[in-house]
Amino acid sequence: MSGNVKRFSVSLGHELLEQFDRVWKSDGLPTRSEAVQAMIRQSLVQKEWQTGKEVAGAIVIVYDHHEKSLASELVDVQHNFEHVVVATQHAHLDHDNCLESIIVNGKALEVEQLVRKLKSLKGLKHTSLMMTTTGKEVG
Ligand code: NI
């Protein structure tokens, strides 16, 4: 949080407030104010993705590297999306399984296209997208 802090009051139903307090406490947030800020930021980030803004994130995939041609297809796809792929980290989880973390930064639609393209490849065991923000538009 930067600059001056503004205070505002919010009216909430007793039950909703109790539920909210339970959730942020179990999530480990330090105060109710921090919890409200985190929720507001989360909704701003969500809006950035929904409205096709410039976003950042990480795509994590798990696959068996013995799958025929999959490794080279993965490289091809990432080169085709070089304008959104910032970096890729590869971990050999065990004898068969690889985990790759692909850091992305670009237009939300293009990142989503990349995810769809990855999901269309045969042999991926799991694909997940962690959607976050470039931080530029979130206070
Ligand atoms: Ni590997």
Image (cartoon, rainbow, N blue to C red):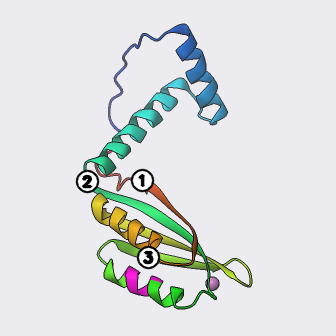
Image height of 35 relative to 60, above or below: above
Q: Nearer the viewer, residue 82 or 40?
A: 82
Horizontal side, residue 113 vs residue 123: left or right: left
Residue 135: give x, y in percent of width and height.
35, 52
From where the camera sits, is residue 1 visible? no
Horizontal side, residue 107 vs residue 89: left or right: left
Tag 1 residue = 132
Membership of 77 in magenta stretch? yes
**Magenta stretch, residue numbers:** 74-78
Image height of 106 relative to 45, above or below: below
Q: Is disc 3 surrounded by few (<14), some (14 to 19) or many (20+) residues within 10 Å?
A: few
Membership of 72 in magenta stretch? no
Under mark 2, the amino acid is: Gly
Q: Nearer the viewer, residue 124 or 106?
A: 124
Residue 10: give x, y in percent of width and height.
41, 14
| Quarter of the figure with the C terminus | top left
Under mark 1, the amino acid is: Thr
Q: Residue at x 34, y 23 (%)?
A: 6
Q: Secondary structure at mark 1?
A: strand
Rendered image: mark on residue 52: 2
Q: Nearer the viewer, mark 2 or mark 3?
A: 2
Q: Nearer the viewer, residue 126 or 44?
A: 126
* Image quadrant in which you'd find residue 5: top left
CA gap, disc 1 and disc 2 = 13 Å
Tag 3 residue = 87
